[in-house]
Amino acid sequence: MTTTLAQKNMEAKKKVFGMIQAFWESQCLYVATRLDIFNILSEGSQSIETLAEKTATKAEKLYVILRALGHLGVLEEQPGKIFAATEVSDLLVTNAEPSIGHFAMHIIEPAQWDAWKELETCLHTGEVPFERANGKTVYEFTRDEDWSGDVFIKAMSFLTDHAVDALLDVFDFSRFGTVMDVGGGQGGLISKIVKRFGCKGMLFDLPYVTETAPAYIQKQGVAADAVQIVTGDVFEGLPTGADAIVMKYFLSSWKDEDALTILRHCREALPKHGKVVLLQCIVPDLGEPTVCPDGIIPSLFATQIMVAVPGGAWRTQKEYERLFTASGFQLENVVHTGTNLSALEFGLVD
């Protein structure tokens, strides 16, 4: 059947309405997560009155938000204003392991929201929207604000848990005697690598970031002596002793000049046979798929990075290759996974 001009126009309007409503959806999701709604419903169905009592909110106003989440398929609304959990809401539970609920709270928290309000102005001034809105960098903010810092670390741990199992099924780390995770946070990635492949591990990050790492690594069932925790500043240098350096979603936080400094320190820290394994979501070039298998849209995440950090950006594969080539590396292997994560393996050029 031929699509009429009116039908095409209506489809275009639906797309625009969807984009307009997207921030309403995210705010409803954020509020419900902050109120522990998904944690409460994981214990069983609840009436709106009970949910309001447990969250110290007004039942009639809370209902409006939860009804919307019901229409979006996040919750199930039953007769009598009873709400029940769904497969979607189960993913958003935040009182157990790091979850996508932590990631949602990190990305949608007021400090991030305020940053997006400054995007238009900063396109003219060249400022970092997050810094203009909050008076400090995102890293300083998460260091200084206890709740935000805790949510940020758990959000990053979730991203690791979400993507790494698929990676480890297709990328072999057993070739390396010691693997160092640069910017590795609590140690989720290096714990999985060590446990899966039997190699030694090193975790490198800022001191305040790694504070919870020993307990977290032990909780993963990894022996205390299997992962060496080293703290420091990546711009001052990296420790030696690793055969491979892994960076997950890390290099994308820095502008090209800073990324080149980091890669120079990687080169200085590695032996001649050493490798850098860049674990990253790759922004597609023209003609390539624009949505990852797990639903992440790299170009939108690239915009979020630009909003949050100075000069940071998710890059295309060609852009990463140019940075590594300028730093004395060459691309040797590319492995894609079933999520948003790809592994780009670089070796040193003699």
Image (cartoon, rainbow, N blue to C red):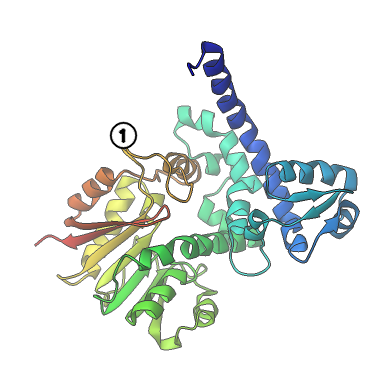
Q: Is residue 183 visible?
A: no
Residue at image coords 61%, 60%:
151
* Outermost residue to the left: 350
Above or below residue 237? Residue 335 is: above
Q: Nearer the viewer, residue 7 or 173?
A: 7
Q: Nearer the viewer, residue 275 or 259?
A: 275
Locate residue 132, reporting x and y percent. 55, 39
Residue at image coords 40%, 63%:
166
Locate residue 226, reporting x and y percent. 39, 84
Residue at image coords 43%, 69%:
189
Locate residue 333, reporting x and y percent. 22, 58
Q: Amino acid at mark 1?
A: Gly
What residue would you read off at disc 1?
A: 287
What SS does tag 1 mark? loop
Residue at image coords 47%, 40%:
300
Q: Quadrant of residue 15?
A: top right
Q: Is residue 191 visible?
A: yes
Locate residue 60, reporting x and y percent. 89, 43
Q: Nearer the viewer, residue 279 or 63?
A: 63
